[in-house]
Amino acid sequence: MPDARPARRIALALAIHRPADVVELFEEVLFADPAQLEAFRCLAGAADLHGAIASASPEVADLLRQLAVADLEPDLDPGETFVRLVHPAAQLELAALEREVRDAARSGDVEREREAAATAGAVRAELELIIDSGEHPDAARAALDAARGLVAWIAERRENGG
């Protein structure tokens, strides 16, 4: 699995430099690193960068200051960054779901096994849309839609203790 940390840093920099472009895209479930998650929460909960820095721990305040001076490519696509963030987060949740399938099979819980296996199949199909997004505009839109669906699924799983 590719390292998602650079994509998360880019996402945080986008949240600082172009917040209107990402406010509807990025979610907490996309930030696994504790410092990056705190940075995202500080940015989301503050009116501006200064407020985010003031509410952050010293380590995260330093991270936010670094990102505030980061150079972003002018043509950087927030949607592509979002898709790059979703893939590893969805892969982690899929691995947990596949463990649930195996556990249900071992315990003889056929209904749970079938349900989890069906969900895992649907998640794999959505991940394929993300992986195969290519350069075609329709494929890119399909990848973005798939990524939004996966984020909703991840958030729901985490809310329900999955």
Image: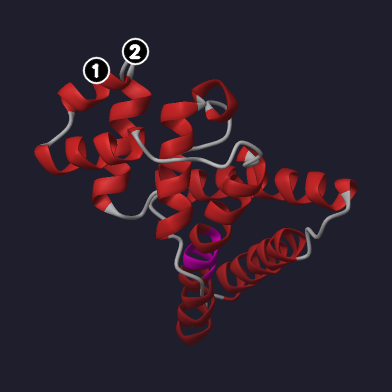
The residue at which mark 1 appears reads as: 51
User: Most prominent secondary structure in the magenta stretch?
Assistant: helix
Locate the C terminus by quadrant: bottom left
Task: State the SS at label 1.
Answer: helix
Residue 161 lies left or right of residue 110; in this view the side is: left
Q: State yes or no: discs 2 and 1 in contact (Cβ < 8 Å).
A: yes
Residue lying furthest top: 47
Tell me which residue sits at (78%, 58%) in the image.
133
Residue lying furthest left: 58
Tell me which residue sits at (51%, 37%) in the image.
26
Q: Amino acid at mark 1?
A: Gly
Tell me which residue sits at (66%, 39%) in the image.
75
Nearest the eye: 76 or 91 = 76
Residue 152 can be seen, yes or no: yes
Residue 17 in the image: above or below residue 100: above
Q: Callout 2: 10 Å neighbours few (<14), some, many (20+)?
A: few
In the image, residue 70 lies in the stretch drawn in magenta? no
Region of the chain picked out in magenta, as a range: 90-94
Q: Amino acid at mark 2?
A: Ala
Residue 83 lies left or right of residue 26; in this view the side is: right
Nearest the eye: 110 or 97 = 97
The residue at which mark 2 appears reads as: 47
Where residue 70 appears, as percent x and y from the top left, is 39, 40
In the image, residue 92 lies in the stretch drawn in magenta? yes
Nearest the eye: 125 or 54 = 54
Task: State the SS at label 2.
Answer: loop
Where residue 122 appears, as percent x and y from the top left, is 71, 62
Tell me which residue sits at (47%, 86%) in the image.
106
Nearest the eye: 130 or 52 = 52
Protein image colouring: secondary structure
Residue 40 can be seen, yes or no: no
